Amino acid sequence: MGKYIVRKSGPLRGEVTISGAKNAVLPIMAAALLSDEECTINDAPALLDVDILCQLLESLGASVDKDLSSNIVKINAEKIMTSEASSKLVKQMRASILVMGPLLARTGRAVIPLPGGCAIGDRPVELHFKGLRALGAEIKVSMTGIVKAHVDKLRGAEIYLDFPSVGATENIMMAASMAEGITIIENAAQEPEIVDLANFMNKMGAKIKGSGTDTIKIEGVKHLHGCQHTVIPDRIEAGTFMLAAAITRGSILLKNVEVDHVKPVIAKLKECGVDIVILEDGSMVVKGDSRPLTSTDIKTLPYPGFPTDLQSPFMALLTTVSGNSAVIETVFENRYMYVKELQKMGAKIKTQDRAATIKGAKKLKGAKVIATDLRAGAAMVLAGLVAEGETEVSEVHHIERGYEHFVEKIRALGGDIEKVDD
């Protein structure tokens, strides 16, 4: 598997190009199952999750031409040979559940084990099932965790989500795109990745309106054709490198970034004293060296609130600034599992339920730590860049699920980091 060795590096300086968004490309790849023609996806990041989903689509019978050196994936699902998803692959990635809606739309049947992924808390698939049942699907879950779904004909419905789940919104959108009649999703997720999926599907001939709002209307069509699409930049990767500039008191130029997608991060970094300059071409300069940085409070919320995926990297920053900070996590109840790892490095953090308090301006020291999940792993690397001595980060496969060329990008900015074999 390998591990990262991170050493105190001084201010990171230079430029970094943000990759295509992991959380956008995965549902788009799943949506390619809706067409019997080839779909070409550009700016697909070279990530472990992308590779796993490519394997899953191939196991279902799709033809996948993957050139991740050029960030292009071509998918042709003309022939779906089976509607049963591989247990081995599904268990590796939570996003595997996204093939359920397209399989029901194309074949009327889907068999899939309950998916795996990062252990950051309860992400109930029941919201997926509720929406698909409203469209007419019969769904049963066995005692061994195998989900069996079938439907004679999907029919449009009005669906209210108890929580604006991104995955449930995406699964329902995909199934409803080929259902008979009109589907309306209320309290839908509003994330940019939802908009990107809708844009991709509309290029295929779907009729989706309202993506990016809390009410999405889908008029079902009988056939979807192939198309080409370029994935949006990854707002979480962008936020991570913004925080890298702040925590190392450096200056980084971010290219290929959607400024509107990272507004909550911009606002909170400015509260800490970070200077952020938006250039005419849409790129962004983040400066953490202009003045002493101070504490702030954050509360994670569904988009357009502060993203839960940046909570742990932001907490790493808060351990290094002056003053006391508070963090409230409202999305996932287990997202503080990484705190004990930061505490090994000397961070002064206390947690109670979904709240955390941080006593800042503490000198971090190198330690052996674990990447407990994808974003926590990024937090460990950021902390290691400013900690005295050497930090050893294990379980880095979590990090490589979501950050393309992470080590190389940090090294190009002056960071002292290397990957070594366990």
Image (cartoon, grey):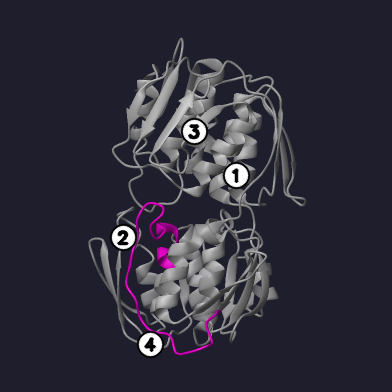
Alpha carbons under labels 2 and 1: distance apart: 26 Å
Q: Tell me which residue sits at (36%, 87%) in the image.
A: 322
Q: Is residue 30 magenta?
A: no
Instruction: Tell me if mark 1 has few (under 14), some (14-19) or many (20+) residues whose alpha carbon lies within 10 angstroms of its own.
Output: many
Q: Earlier in the sequence, mark 2 or mark 4?
A: 2
Which one is closest to the eye, mark 3 or mark 2?
3
Could you say which disc has been placed on residue 329 in the image?
2
For disc 4, the marked residue is 361
Q: Whole-percent x and y of residue 58? A: 66, 31
First in sequence: mark 2 vs mark 1: 1
Q: Secondary structure at mark 1?
A: helix
As measured in the structure, the alpha-carbon distance from the residue carrying label 1 to the one carrying label 3 is 20 Å
Image coordinates for residue 352, horizontal then vertical, percent? 22, 66
Residue extending furthest left? 352
Q: Residue at x 61, y 36 (%)?
A: 200
**The N terminus: image quadrant:** bottom right
Q: Residues within 10 Å of mark 2 (few under 14, many from 20)?
A: many
Q: Decide which of 71, 238 is in the foreground and name it.
A: 238
Residue at figure coordinates x 41%, y 66% from the top left: 312
Report, in whole angstroms, how far the alpha carbon at label 2 lies from the one at label 4. Answer: 22 Å
Q: How packed is label 3: few (under 14 Cα within 10 Å), some, or many (20 or more)?
A: some
| Magenta-colored span | 287-313
Query: Which one is in front in this view, the residue at disc 4 or the one at disc 3?
Result: 3
Label pair 3/2, CB-CB below 8 angstroms: no
In-image side of 27 versus 172 (left or right)? right
